[in-house]
Image: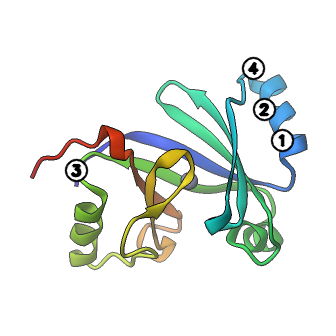
């Protein structure tokens, strides 16, 4: 598996209306996109720092993954996402062979047109880990 960079850090927040101005004023970053990902029951807001993004996540449903996370742990860092450049499915297959517990055995659609998949925190030292791939930037090599 080849990773190129940290694609984004996902942060669970209760309210984007509060968190977006906080990030803009505190860090001087500009929110460049807000997008709802119905599949994950979240509304996301993005900031860019170099090649890496900050993804703020507000739950649209208390029973969704972010709603449950905030109820249990409160607001804070939710996951770290790495960009893979060798095909997401290949990376998942490779990890699965190594015995890593996968939440997603196949890629699914994330925000910003990315293909994403989550690895189980049990296999990654307690950190919910996301792999993502930009289909338009994929380097096909084996
Ligand atoms: Zn993410």
Q: CA distance from mark 4 to mark 2?
A: 7 Å
Residue designated by label 4: 28
Report the residue at 80% width, 71% height from top: 61
Q: Secondary structure at mark 1?
A: helix
In this rendering, is residue 118 above or below 86?
below
- The picture quadrant where one finds residue 4 is top left
Label 4 vs 3, first from the N-terminus? 4
Residue designated by label 1: 19
Foreground: 141 or 28? 141
User: In the image, is 80 to the left or to the right of 62?
Assistant: left
Label 4 Cα crowd, 10 Å radius (few <14 / some 14-19 / many 20+):
few
In this view, the mark in front (3 or 2): 3
Residue designated by label 3: 86
Q: Secondary structure at mark 4?
A: loop
In this rendering, is residue 112 above or below 69?
above
Label 1 Cα crowd, 10 Å radius (few <14 / some 14-19 / many 20+):
some
Relative image position of residue 17 (x, y in whole percent): 89, 42
**Mark sitting on residue 23:** 2
């Amino acid at each position: 598996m080849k990773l190129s960079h940290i694609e984004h850090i996902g942060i669970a927040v209760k309210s984007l209306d509060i968190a977006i101005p906080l990030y803009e004023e505190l860090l001087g970053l500009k929110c460049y996109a807000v997008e709802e990902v119905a599949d994950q029951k979240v509304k996301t807001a993005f900031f860019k720092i170099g090649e890496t993004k900050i993804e703020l996540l507000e739950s649209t449903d208390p029973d969704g993954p972010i709603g449950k996370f905030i109820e249990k742990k409160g607001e804070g860092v939710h996951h770290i996402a790495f960009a893979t450049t060798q095909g997401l499915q290949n990376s998942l297959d490779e990890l699965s062979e190594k015995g890593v517990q996968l939440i997603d055995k196949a890629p699914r659609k994330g925000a910003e047109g990315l293909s994403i998949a989550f690895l189980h925190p049990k296999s990654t030292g307690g950190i919910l880990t996301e792999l993502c791939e930009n289909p338009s930037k994929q380097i096909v090599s084996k």
